[in-house]
Image (cartoon, rainbow, N blue to C red):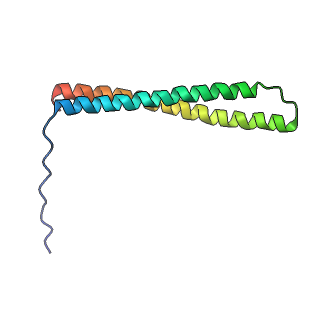
Amino acid sequence: MSLGVMPAANPPAFDPSGCASRSHEVQRLAWRMKTCVDQADTVLASLRKIQLEEWQSPAGREYRTTIAIHASALMRARENLDGAAAVVLRHSQNVSLQSGRGY
């Protein structure tokens, strides 16, 4: 059985409109991610409001503690998502630049 060398696949021809379209799609993804960041901010504001409630019972204090733990996890996720959105937006700009250079 011979395992000869397989020919390399032909790269697709350069299509500037395709690059622009991809750039637009990547930008739309970044802005959808930013929308999610905004939604997380809204939820975090609601959680902060709950934490300010003056429940004196042990169950109320435990509830506030649980809310604080979840708010902290959501804040970390929000920060990661915000950073990822910035990276995706930068990538969309790179796609636009590449289309101008003929890559």
Which quadrant would residue 75 be assigned to in this image? top right
Res 78 visible: yes
> Could you tell whether 95 is left or right of 30 in the image?
left
Q: Residue 10, relative to residue 32: is it above or below?
A: below
Foreground residue, 74 or 3? Answer: 74
Which residue sits at x=68%, y=29%?
47
> Could you tell whether 56 is left or right of 67 in the image?
right
Which residue sits at x=80%, y=38%?
62
Foreground residue, 23 or 72? Answer: 23
> Could you tell whether 11 is left or right of 65 in the image?
left
Which quadrant would residue 26 be assigned to in this image? top left
Residue 20 pos. (x, y %)? 24, 28
Which residue sits at x=83%, y=26%?
54
Quarter that holds the C terminus: top left
Residue 100 pos. (x, y %)? 18, 25
Residue 52 pos. (x, y %)? 76, 24
Which residue sits at x=55%, y=31%?
78
Res 88 visible: no
Q: Residue 48, relative to residue 66: is it above or below?
A: above
Residue 44 pos. (x, y %)? 63, 28
Residue found at the far right of this picture: 57
Which quadrant would residue 87 be assigned to in this image? top left
Q: Residue 65, relative to residue 53: is it above or below?
A: below
Quarter that holds the N terminus: bottom left
